[in-house]
Image: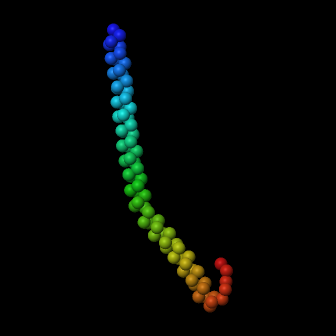
Amino acid sequence: MIFSLEIFLNLAIVLQILLIALISVATAETFFSKLKIIKKTRNDEAPKEIKKDMQHCFQKWEKRWIKCILSKGKYFQG
């Protein structure tokens, strides 16, 4: 009777370890698949944002350049 109880307890522990391992693997797979989706989405959107930022900077530079031309070399602020 005691022998079978020890086997049962050991088997229960082994099953718990296996279940934890399976849950961990499933969770990790889900996490990494979502991480890949997030990275792909981010990489797809990044060039659009960079282009938009560059256009904005260029427009600001163009406005400053026009101010310089209109001032004919005189000092001005803003």
- Front-lying residue, 4 or 64: 4
Measuring from the top left, give residue 13's x and y in whole percent.
Answer: 37, 24
Q: Residue at x 39, y 40 (%)?
A: 27
Examine the rendered structure and indicate whether residue 17 appears above or below residue 44. Answer: above
Q: Quadrant of the N terminus?
A: top left
Q: Quadrant of the C terminus?
A: bottom right
Examine the rendered structure and indicate whether residue 70 appears above or below residue 1. Answer: below
Residue at the limit of the structure toward the bottom, as seen here: 72
Left or right: 76 in relation to 28: right
Q: Residue at x 34, y 26 (%)?
A: 15
Measuring from the top left, give residue 6's x and y in whole percent.
Answer: 35, 15
Measuring from the top left, give residue 28's x and y in whole percent.
Answer: 38, 42
Examine the rendered structure and indicate whether residue 51 appears above or below residue 28. Answer: below
Left or right: 42 in relation to 7: right
Measuring from the top left, give residue 69's x and y in whole percent.
Answer: 59, 88
Image quarter of residue 66: bottom right
Image quarter of residue 39: bottom left
Residue at the limit of the structure toward the top, as seen here: 1
Q: Residue at x 34, y 17 (%)?
A: 8
Q: Residue at x 50, y 69 (%)?
A: 53
Examine the rendered structure and indicate whether residue 67 appears above or below residue 30. Answer: below
Marks counted in the figure total: 0
> Colour scheme in the image?
rainbow
